[in-house]
Image (cartoon, rainbow, N blue to C red):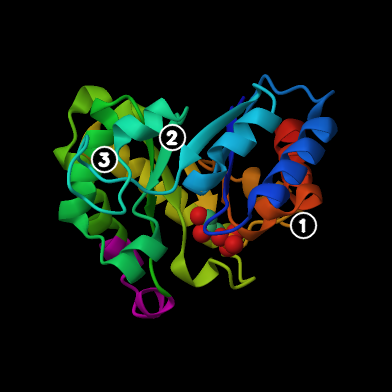
Amino acid sequence: MKKYLIAGNWKMNFLKNETIQFAKELSSKLENRALEQVELLICAPFTNFHYLQNNLSDKWSFGAQNMHFADSGAYTGEVSPLMLMDAGCEYVILGHSERRQYFGEDNELLTKKINSALNHKLKPIFCIGETIEERNRNITFDILNQQLEVLKNVEPDLLSNITIAYEPVWAIGTGLTATTEQIAEVHSWINNYLQTNLSTSLKILYGGSMNAGNSAEILAIDNVSGGLIGGASLKVDQFMQIIDNAINLS
Ligand code: 13P
């Protein structure tokens, strides 16, 4: 039986009032759900942590979408792992394709961030995925291979605290979801990579236009341990349906 992780990535969305309203609605809908086999997580903007925590039940875990690798210092505009822990975060998304694309995050930086998160007992959700151009050139697995190199620089004992998120860049925010076959193929490849190169098995989430309608099919695929959900995690009914599908499958 799988224990699913259903994680919302709110990206740069929601002000105070929307956050409070969303949290209250979601909490009331979740009241009678059996959640033993499903872990629920929201990775919100820093400014919303407080409002979420005050209005969501303790069934939820919280996470950030990025962090600096240093504990403190003269890094204007950055947030440190210590600050995230202090603010009640358990998880941090690292290496999201939007951070790679718009903020130039590369393997060298991500190695520092992942190790820093792990040393502070924050659980990284490490995102990997190919662009459409890379998929069309048949180099998807070369790209994933390069991105996963980062994990070879992690203390082996700490690897088990990492969750992988496979997010094909072309499926993010586009309404295009990878097919069941594509997801099954990549997740199985990642699982083999982890076993062969790092002697470990990790949770592997799928992300990319997951929604109420396609989530049951995606979550049922072998080696899919949950979802990292963008747009649909901002809509209570959509998010609830994804959670219900995970409950029904677990
Ligand atoms: P969408 O669900 O909006 O495609 O976003 C996926 C994502 O980037 C989650 O990290």
Residue under the image location 45 percent in, 30 percent down: 87
Residue 7's spot in the image, x, y percent?
57, 42
Give the quadrant of the C terminus. top right
The residue lying toward the viewer, choosing from 204 and 105, is 105
Q: What is the x, y in percent for residue 228?
A: 55, 48
Q: CA distance from mark 1 to mark 2?
A: 27 Å
Q: Which mark is residue 91?
A: 2
Q: Is residue 40 visible?
A: no
From which residue to which does the magenta span run? 132-143
Between marks 1 and 2 in the image, the one whose residue lies nearer the viewer: 2
**Which residue in the structure is indicated by mark 1?**
213
Q: Mark 1 touching mark 3, by CB under 8 A?
A: no
**Residue appearing at x 72%, y 39% in the figure:** 23
Of the two numbered discs 1 and 2 on the same chain, state the one appearing first in sequence.
2
Across and down, in percent, residue 50 comes to 57, 35
**Three-letter residue code for mark 2:** Tyr
Q: Residues within 10 Å of mark 3 (few under 14, many from 20)?
A: many
Query: Where residue 157 sits in the image (x, y, percent)?
Result: 23, 22
Q: Left of 162 or right of it: where is 71?
A: left
User: Which disc number belongs to residue 114?
Assistant: 3
Cα distance in 3D space between marks 3 and 2 = 11 Å
Kindly state the secondary structure of the residue where label 2 is placed.
strand
Magenta span main SS: helix
